[in-house]
Amino acid sequence: MSNYQCRNQKLSQWVQETASLCKPESIYWCDGSKQEYDRLMAQMVASGMALPLKKRPNCFHFRSDPSDVARVEDRTYISYPDQADAGPTNNWFAPDELKATMAGLYQGCMRGRTMYVIPFSMGPVGSKLSKIGVEITDSPYVVCNMHIMTRVGDGVLDLLDQGAEFIPCLHSIGAPLEPGQKDGSWPCAPIEKKYISHFPEENLIWSYGSGYGGNALLGKKCLALRIASAVARREGWMAEHMLILRLTNPEGRQFHITGAFPSACGKTNLAMLLPTIPGWKCECVGDDIAWMRIGPDGRLYAINPEAGFFGVAPGTSYASNPMAMDSIKENSIFTNCAITDEGDVWWELMDGPPPAHAVDWKGRDWTPASTEVAAHANARFTAPASQCPIICPDWEKPEGVPIDIFIFGGRRASVVPLVTEAYGWDHGVFMGATAASETTAANIGAVGNLRRDPFAMLPFCGYHMGDYFQHWFNMGDRLGNKAPRVFYVNWFRKTAEGKWLWPGFGDNSRVLKWMCERVEGKVGGAETPIGLLPLSQDLDMQGLNLPAENLAELLKVDTEAWRAELPDIAKHFQKFGDRLPARLQRQLEELSKRLG
Ligand code: SAT
Ligand code: MN
């Protein structure tokens, strides 16, 4: 029944136990090879689940069930024996109770299906910063996506055979097949049976009922953020929801920047930006997750634990992100896009006029006259990072890249200026801890509501958020004067009429340049109650015809509006009770004093 004899006792035992619980028809150990990928894709094409794209070599499109289009934060659990350890921002069930419920669901859940065992590494195989996971799944879509998003294969199996530790990640779509039953094109369980569960004390992940992205590709949000953040706290490093980029100035000096923004707030676009200012060069290290450790020289070093991009498709175009467009020309997977009559994918705001006719993400005819969008707002592409034309030559360096700058931010139509520098580490932690953003389609739920999303980790922190804040202070204390400088940005300011005030994308390089020059001590910053802001002459505006009143608005500190934020921040802090670090409370008091 199985194609591999594993010599790692713990692993082979777990695989056997899982098989006797889930009762698959067969067990298949993945080797990560191209042949394996091609074979599984061919099977999915034959079954009608995948559509090969005529216009893109080796690319396939999938349509999910309309109920299974995004992460399900309401059904995501952080399970510690004591609820207090999960904190006020996570859903919680006691481990015993949650496991009993889920074991009931897992009982026979893989009937009629193959159980795939995927050994994978988050981070370059063998790097001291990397972690090994093993995902068991009954979804071939998950296997193919994991091939792109992580490092699957023999190197990892060898390490496991030598007894390496691994994080077990169990996944089922929750749709057993009865004998003779025809399979659907996207089998999954109804929402009330979906569970995305984490047991941080055991480094264990159990996911049930969803085949989609962050719910099912367990190396990503589940392992690399929720479990890893808890491990990182214990081990004294950081697992963050951050892009990583390298910016090189005209003199050849390199700056490494990480940025934490909530899902669907432009991390992928920023990570691959083409600077509009002459002589500056950007290279992408990662677009979603950073694992960071203090190196022998006392600086903070980051690796990208992933091997691919799982990016939001709508809005991606040669105008907004040409490097992403070039990354997805071949060997990519698309989910919930529209399909044109020529056999290509299409989504809202792709370059050029919309097609006269397409088939929308639900499989219905679509024309520009349709009242609904053609692609789901959270339609995604999965592409190998190595296909990005500006992937950094050091993106797989085992020791990572040294970080100079942290950026926090989110979507705020008003109040928050284009860029602010923190007065110091504690103020920077305060900025991260109070970050707020309008919600997006990356989660099932309302879109456009303002919510506090500390460090863009609200859906991803695997322990009490108050302790997480304290961990940031602890890291800062250890880093001392080698700590990255902290900035807060807002690319999403709008006029009263709802027009963008700032062009964004490549022009964000102007803001990054100011940050780098701050690090070098070349430019000043104006002291304001909320932090240091650029003087308008210090922002490089050459070649950009931005009306002066836009810039003035973007760099204005509206003390009234900021004072109005204070009660909301105080309320946000109250949630963390006695686990709120006193240093954050002090920052709030100081901000309110500065605002007068
Ligand atoms: O679905 S994912 O969680 O992988 C994408 C996201 O929400 O950031
Ligand atoms: Mn993300």
Image: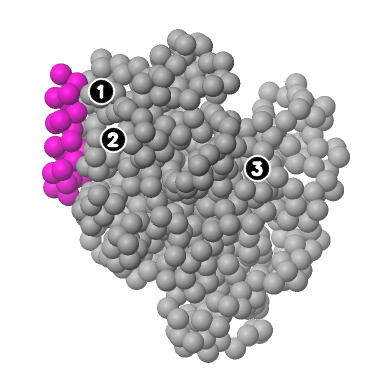
Q: Main secondary structure of the magenta part?
A: helix
User: Residue 528 — which label?
Assistant: 1
Start-end of magenta stretch: 573-596
User: Residue 402 — which label?
Assistant: none
Label 3 amino acid? Met
Nearest the eye: 342 or 591: 591
Does label 2 or label 1 sit earlier along the sequence? Answer: 2
Residue denoted by label 3? 323
Q: Residue at x 42, y 78 (%)?
A: 165
Label 2 amino acid? Ala
Give the quadrant of residue 231: bottom left
**Residue at mark 2 to residue at mark 1: CA–CA distance:** 10 Å
Q: Position of residue 554 (x, y in %)?
A: 41, 19
Q: Position of residue 218 (x, y in %)?
A: 51, 61
Is residue 24 shown to the viewer in this render? no
Cβ at disc 2 under 8 Å from ligand 2: no
Is residue 276 shown to the viewer in this render? yes
| SS under mark 3 | helix
Q: Residue at x 36, y 30 (%)?
A: 523
| SS under mark 1 | strand
Does label 2 or label 3 sit earlier along the sequence? Answer: 3
Q: Is residue 589 magenta?
A: yes
